[in-house]
Amino acid sequence: MLDVLQRNLNLPPFLWNILLGASALITGLIIKYLLAFILRLTTRKNTSYSLIRSILNRLGLAVNYLLPLLVFNMVLPFMELSRKPMNFLNKTAEICLIIAFGFTLTGLVKVFEDYMYHSYDLSKEDNLRERKLRTQLQFVRKFAVSTILVLTLCAVLLSFDNLRKIGAGLLTGVGVSGIIIGFAAQRSLSNFLAGMQIAFTQPIRIDDVLVVEGEWGRVEEITLTYVVLGIWDQRKLILPINYFIEKPFQNWTRTGSAILGTAFLYLDHTAPFDAMREEFDRILKTHPLWDRRVKAVQVTDIKDRVIEVRFLVSANSSGKAFDLRCDIREKMLVFLRDNHPYCLPKTRAVLEEGVKQKNDINPFEIPGQA
């Protein structure tokens, strides 16, 4: 068909090549925008997650290059070029297609990640399963994208005959170079293996609540080399990933988000325990943060001047447990202050008869003499 068109138009080869190449690129863009327009019509009324919207967002830029290059590659044989320019144009189109296809594959990986993030939402109360999958998915996504980029670069290099020869020559020295690289990359390899171990054995997960180095925070990001912990006061604690393989730490959400919390009050020995238990039950009965699993009022220690009273409560998450503890501590203190102020901590002094007051002592009196 293109041969017939060329004979009918009878254009010079230079002009024909420019017209054919430009038409191919424009045709590819038109096809892309028509597909995007049709797909957008199906998601116009959908305000929540949409797989088609994710495809448009993640693959739009890559397809902008891939489709025009595909059409251009199809019309290359119909161009009137000598051997050298044709070989150069073929090689350029081949390399561009490889790169565009690589970016399309990375976009597909991100489309799959969006779908899994939507299917396993972290916003629910008990999100143990979601945190498990997201931790694995984040590692797999980064590994897959890195692999695609490396394979794309290898495909580009292998498309040149001269580089193939260089690669074959380098393979003869792979033994020595492998040993050198092994020593140089020992730390990186250990981090990579630690990342794989964490992704699949999961001592930590995305959104886990940890206490590390005396800091309380949530796991925000797990990379191939480090972990980002978001501290409660909006600081970020960055730790090497092998830290969580080699050192102990606290994981408050290892098997679930529910947790126990304690609030302590230090009171006088005359504290009214029955009244405190009644008030404690009244506070918890309608409290929205209590999950109705555990409640207890216990005297956990007796000292010479005060007693230690522990209020034990349970909540669905560590954040709710912290707020509940603070609320219980405040309301119980207000109750005791207003109704039983005598039980607040005090210091006692007993004066016995016959003992001289400090002001009555004669500084010149010799001890033991009347």
Image (tube, rainbow, N blue to C red):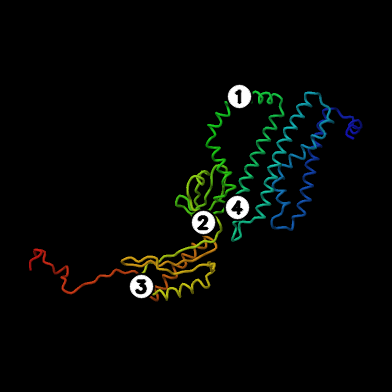
Question: Where residue 175 sits: x, y (%)?
Answer: 59, 26
Amino acid type, callout 4:
Lys
Q: Examine the image and state in which quarter residue 32 appears.
A: top right
Q: Secondary structure at mark 1?
A: loop
Residue that numbered label 4 is attached to: 132
Q: Is residue 270 left or right of residue 61?
A: left
Amino acid type, callout 3:
Cys
Residue at image point 63% right, 45% down: 140
* Image quarter (top left, top right, bottom left or bottom right) of the N terminus: top right
* Image quarter (top left, top right, bottom left or bottom right) of the C terminus: bottom left
Residue at image point 63% right, 24% down: 172
Q: Residues within 10 Å of mark 4 (few under 14, many from 20)?
A: many
Asked if disc 1 and disc 2 are in contact, CB closer than 8 Å, the reply is: no
Give the Cα distance between marks 1 and 2.
50 Å
Asked if disc 4 and disc 1 are in contact, CB closer than 8 Å, the reply is: no
Question: Where residue 27 sits: x, y (%)?
Answer: 81, 40
Asked if disc 4 and disc 3 are in contact, CB closer than 8 Å, the reply is: no
Please tell me which of labels 4 and 3 falls first in the chain: 4
Asked if disc 2 and disc 3 are in contact, CB closer than 8 Å, the reply is: no
Amino acid type, callout 2:
Trp
Residue that numbered label 2 is attached to: 252
Give the Cα distance between marks 4 and 1.
43 Å
Residue that numbered label 3 is attached to: 343
Query: Closer to us: mark 4 or mark 3?
Result: 4
Asked if disc 1 and disc 3 are in contact, CB closer than 8 Å, the reply is: no
Question: Which of the numbered marks, if any, corresponds to residue 173?
Answer: 1
> Quick check: 67 above or below 370?
above
